[in-house]
Image (cartoon, rainbow, N blue to C red):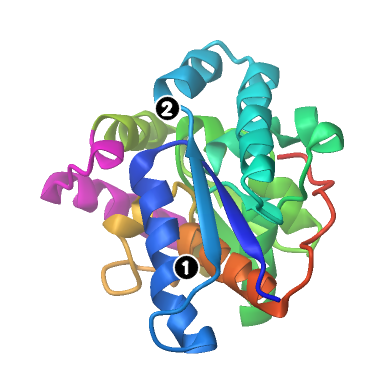
Amino acid sequence: MIGHIGIVACSAEGAALCYRTIAAEGATILGDHDHPRVTLDSIPMARHMEAIRAGDWAAVGELMLVSAGTLKGAGADFLICPDNTIHQALPFIRDRSPLPWLHIAEVVAAEAGRRGFRRLGVTGTKYLVESEVYPEALAARGIDFVRTPEGAREDLNRIIFDELVYGDFRPDSVAAFRRTIERLRDEGCDAVVLGCTEIPLIISDANSALPTLDSTRLLARAALKRASSGGPGPRPSTGSG
């Protein structure tokens, strides 16, 4: 029995990339034009941002819980959220979630461990970079990390929210991310987490000074593997974000 994946969306570009990855790569496991059933629920990103800007992660969690209930009703077996930032809200709802979750940072940390990386640079929104979402997931596997340097956080945050989430990809913004990754390399990182689900739309191994850990596609592949195994999905994450 192939599992049914529920996608809790925040930004359209990140959710679309996650869905496309599941659909495109499903064929490698299940056969031509095949993939697990996928249902996506998208509460407008504006509602999430109101709570994020207020620092009200409990309210963000309630939005995620609404989507979780909708997806449960649609028949989903487990949930993924292709948005790193709002994983900070999972601790507020995990005990009440009607379905289990795959945690994006835990998926990335597992891949980093598999590939033998020991010190990761973490990029993403300022909310994500300043959070414990990745530090806690990486610490559980004994992996060190470096946050995006403070001087670059606001610039990259602006690029993400003003450009990438709207599908606006500019050469100078690509250059800004590349410079940041070079700085992380100079601080001893051996790989970089693309910790916003839109970053992989402009950064990859082809133009990065460090090997990349593409959180969006890694999450999609983990969901594809879980669904294809036919199991009911993992237990609700006990991670903190």
Q: Is residue 177 magenta?
A: yes
Residue found farthest to the left:
171
Q: Amino acid at mark 1?
A: Ile
Q: Nearer the viewer, residue 162 or 46?
A: 46
Q: Residue at x 52, y 58 (%)?
A: 38
The magenta stretch spans which residues? Answer: 163-188
- Within the image, what quadrant is residue 156 found in? top left
Judge whether 39 appears above or below 226 on screen.
Answer: above
> Residue 45 has which mark?
2
Residue 1, horizontal then vertical, whole percent? 71, 76
Marker disc for residue 60: none
Q: Residues within 10 Å of mark 1 (few under 14, many from 20)?
A: many
- Tell me: 103 left or right of 28: right
Indicate the position of residue 47 as horizontal and vertical percent values.
47, 18
Mark 2: which secondary structure? helix
Residue at figure coordinates x 55%, y 44% from the top left: 84
**Residue most toward the top?**
54
Report the side of 53 relative to 3 (left or right).
left
Dominant secondary-structure state across the stretch colored magenta: helix
Contact, CB < 8 Å: mark 2 with mark 1?
Answer: no
Q: Nearer the viewer, residue 128 or 201?
A: 201
Report whether residue 27 is seen.
yes
Q: Amino acid at mark 2?
A: Met
Which residue is under mark 1? Answer: 22
The residue sitting at 55% across, 15% down in the picture is: 51
Q: Residues within 10 Å of mark 2 (few under 14, many from 20)?
A: few
Residue drawn at x 45%, y 79% as measured from the top left: 34
